[in-house]
Image (cartoon, rainbow, N blue to C red):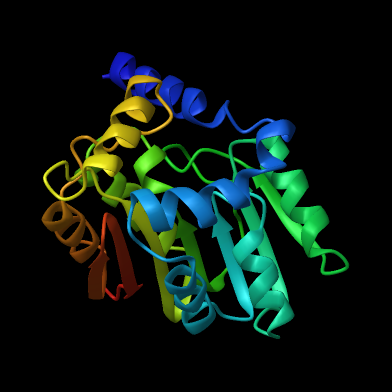
Amino acid sequence: MDGVKNKTVFKAHKAVRVYSPFLLSFYDLYVYKCVSPVFFQCPEARIVDFYLENISKNHLEVGVGTGYLLKKCLDAGKLSSIALLDLNENCLEATKKRLAPLQADTFKANILEDLPFTAHRFDSIGLNYVLHCVPGTFKEKGEALGSLGKYLNDDGLLFGSTAIYHPGQNVMAKLVMDAYNRNGIFNNRSDIKEELADGLSKHFTDVRLRQIGNVLFFMARKSTKG
């Protein structure tokens, strides 16, 4: 069992290695102007609006990228307290700098392992374009989301989006995701919408999913179970 866990952890680290300062310099343009609207058929505005509608002033962002969406929320007056969790130091530093002068608490960690929080509690937790990079099936990823949910305040909301590997839907999306899965950047070949719903329902009482193109949006209220 330890061997399986170690392999999964290794794959998680491999998935985030690509996020160098050079890549982050054009990441937003590539993801939100090219990959998302053209390949995944999900316009940037849908993702931005989703964040503006669901983020709270007391927020934890998991898998932070460059802080592109968080900066839009900050400019809209939606943020006053922010924590950042990512396995890649470059992403943490880029996002912290982007959100200045708002002070961000940063945590370098893997959501598949023990989380580094103690007394922290949040009103919202966001994961944009994160789960398709995380190794394992949605069953295993659902357990990680359940662990994150423990750090939500009452009636807190966990929300995010992920690219679904659905080759019959979009040939261009299939080509991109095939390449990224081969290189270990994505780990979403086994991701099935219904399994995410089942995984979230184990830990949260109110689960909602919506798919646009190859992008699956999810929302889950903090569970009262357990």
- Nearer-the-camera pick, 196 or 24: 24
Q: Quadrant of residue 16?
A: top right
Residue at 40%, 68% in the rendered image: 159
Q: Nearer the viewer, residue 184 or 84?
A: 184
- Residue at 82% across, 65% down: 103
For the question of whether residue 147 can be seen, the reply is: no
**Which quadrant is the C terminus positioned in?**
bottom left
- Apparent side of residue 178 relative to residue 117 in the rendered image (left or right): left
Q: Nearer the viewer, residue 83 or 224?
A: 83
Q: Is residue 176 left or right of residue 117?
A: left
165 is higher (above) or lower (below) than 28:
above
Residue located at (72% from left, 32% from top)? 22
Percent position of residue 5, x then y: 34, 23
| Residue 10 coordinates in the image, percent (x, y) | 45, 20
Residue at the right extreme, as displayed = 101
Q: Position of residue 182 (x, y in %)?
A: 33, 20
Image quadrant containing the N terminus: top left
Corner quadrant of residue 194: bottom left
Q: Position of residue 29 (x, y in %)?
A: 61, 51
**Residue 177 shows in the view:** yes
